Amino acid sequence: MKIALLTCEKLPDLNPEDQKLIPELAKHNITATAVIWDDKTINWSDFDYLIFRNIWDYFEKETKFNIWLEQIEKLGIKTLNTIDIIKQNKHKFYLRELEKQGISILPTLFIEKTNNLQVESIIPNHWEKAVLKPAFSAGSYLTEVFEVADIQEINEKYKTISQEKELLLQEFMPQIQTLGETSFIFFNKKFSHAVNKKPVDGDFRVQTLFGGKYNLVQPGQELIEKAQKVIDTFPDKLLYARVDGIVIENELHLMEVECIEPDLYFDLSEGSIERFVASIVELIY
């Protein structure tokens, strides 16, 4: 069994955590190789499965990525997560569908492409601060937090972006700065571990790149069940998913579900690499 662990040019050998998957998979007679997803020299038919891992530039190469997905689908190569899930998950308007299914999401407005962005005409009166970001994005890419008083400046800043991309407008929750964001990680639709991520003082971005601090946490069963409800909306096989949200008074307010290339925090949870590999084996054999 040959597997490609998909990565990007910036991380040709995967990140250090994901590199540990290769020897672990070898114990199950699976030969795993780090492969850059947009490397034109690769013969994809050489692999039995492709597993999306560190493709951390896909949102910067939107058109190229969409064409590549179509190519892999036409070749009939199996992927984890499936191409259908990747296609759905790469565009954050999936949050609208989850809300219709009874999932509690952060207050969000979905903005179609427009030649005349006027945030002031749609933003609720009681919002004091908001976040604007493209629907096809990751890692705080083209994301702005702004005071309602600065709307005209935001209209100008996003004038061109809004013509090319759909946008999400979300109410800024100050709790992100105090309570942080909690990630619930699932392998093969089963809960594995949870991590709380807090930004540095005065920032809202929780990524370590911006100084965010991560800690393993043990959420209660009720919260795990709320995250599980999000996972159960997926009909297909799901090798991994990361449910990201803000927990306020034991309620989970969903920010996003990461099914394409999330960090799974193997280094913070003992046994998580083994659990992940066991899930791969369950799904491919």
Image (cartoon, rainbow, N blue to C red):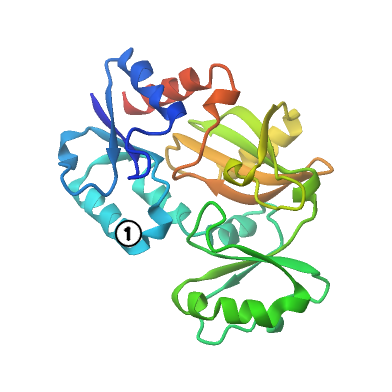
The image quadrant that residue 109 belongs to is: bottom right
Q: Quadrant of the N terminus?
A: top left
Q: Is residue 7 shown above or below 23?
A: below
Position above or below: 210 against 107: above
* Type of the residue with mark 1: Asn
In front of the other: 15 or 272: 15
Q: Write the residue at 55% across / 24% down.
A: 267
Picture residue at 76% right of the left edge, 67% below the top: 129
On the image, the x and y values in percent for residue 115 come to: 50, 86
Q: Which quarter of the picture shows residue 35?
A: top left
Residue 81 x/y as whole percent: 40, 40
Whether residue 56 is visible to the viewer of this picture, yes or no, is yes
Where the C terminus falls, by quadrant? top left
Q: Residues within 10 Å of mark 1 (few under 14, many from 20)?
A: some
User: Which residue appears at 32% of the width and 38% of the height?
Assistant: 12
Check disc 1 and report the residue beneath it: 66
